[in-house]
Image (cartoon, rainbow, N blue to C red):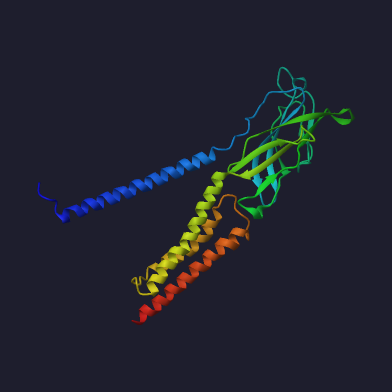
Amino acid sequence: MPPVPHESRQPLRRRIRITSSIVIVGLIYAASLFGYWWISSSYPALSPFDPAPAEYPVVSIDMDTLHTATNELEVDVLLIAPERYLDPRLGVLNTDIAIRLHPWVNLGELKFPKGETPGSITATVEAHGDADYWPFDTYATKPLTADALIGTGDDRTVEPADIRVSGGIEGWNVQVDQTESDPSASVIELSRHRGTLAFDLGVVLVLIALPAMAMIVAIETIMGRRQFLPPLFTWFAAMLFAVVPLRNILPGAPPPGAWIDQAIVIWVLIALVVAMAIYVVAWYRYSKL
């Protein structure tokens, strides 16, 4: 068999390189998706909502939203009343019940009136933490306890109420612990999910890559190794204005002036401006030729 001409082997090699590059990129993409799924599923979930009544009133707390800047945790509070406080025919309360959460919530007593089916009430509890430590900030409530005030007027009685915590917040790992001094008290602890941290790292790497590419192009151009191309001015401007949107999509929206702004964002902006200035100098030299 005659040898294959060199000219005919080049298209074949080019197709092999292109196919290999596509396969490698696809494998990297699939590996990143699998890694994110594995990281995201590595935390145990809280027990699902349990509507079963107990001997004492039960306060079900379903987490809704965490406001890191104000250290506030929004929750939905639902009363699960014992059967003795329910109308057996209609399933509504046969007496007024008010719930007191300790520490106090913003609404004070949460009232569930007689003759109605208990519905969830949105309330806010304190969750102490420091948002400036983003994305490694953690938050925790004080020990939560609850009392149920049964009846109306001077005839009201107080009964202890159990607390059940369910649900979760997207991007947060939630853990509920009982205190040693009071087993009936529950502490809700929240820390950022490792999947969220991985996404944060990816965005930070993109931010760092922007000025690195801009500096390479600018330095190569001003040293005469690459041809000056006027349309690249728009590319520099696009990268400059892309920094703030990239910073704002970071999960958890770190407060303005956080350490990431001082350590990364401001230096990315400075490096992009310097690269653009170098390219302007290259334009000035090119225009004089």
Q: Is residue 203 visible?
A: yes
Q: Position of residue 250 (x, y in %)?
A: 55, 52
Left or right, 234 with respect to 162, comes to left
The structure residue drawn at horizontal position 60% and vertical position 50%, both measured from the top left corner, is 252
Q: Nearer the viewer, residue 174 or 152?
A: 174
Residue 214, relative to residue 89: is it above or below? below
Q: Position of residue 163 (x, y in %)?
A: 73, 32
From this viewpoint, which residue is outermost toward the left? 2
Q: Nearer the viewer, residue 157 or 12?
A: 12
Q: Is residue 99 visible?
A: no
The structure residue drawn at horizontal position 25% and vertical position 53%, both measured from the top left corner, is 14
Point out the image quarter for the C terminus: bottom left
Left or right, 263 with respect to 73, comes to left
Left or right, 6 with respect to 67, comes to left
The structure residue drawn at horizontal position 59% and vertical position 53%, both measured from the top left corner, is 253
Q: Nearer the viewer, residue 42 or 68?
A: 42
The structure residue drawn at horizontal position 80% and vertical position 29%, both measured from the top left corner, is 160
Left or right, 24 with respect to 40, comes to left
Q: Nearer the viewer, residue 212 or 127?
A: 212
Q: Position of residue 247 (x, y in %)?
A: 54, 57
Q: Position of residue 222 (x, y in %)?
A: 39, 74
- When asked about the image quadrant of residue 224, the answer is bottom left
Residue 193, relative to residue 287: is it above or below? above
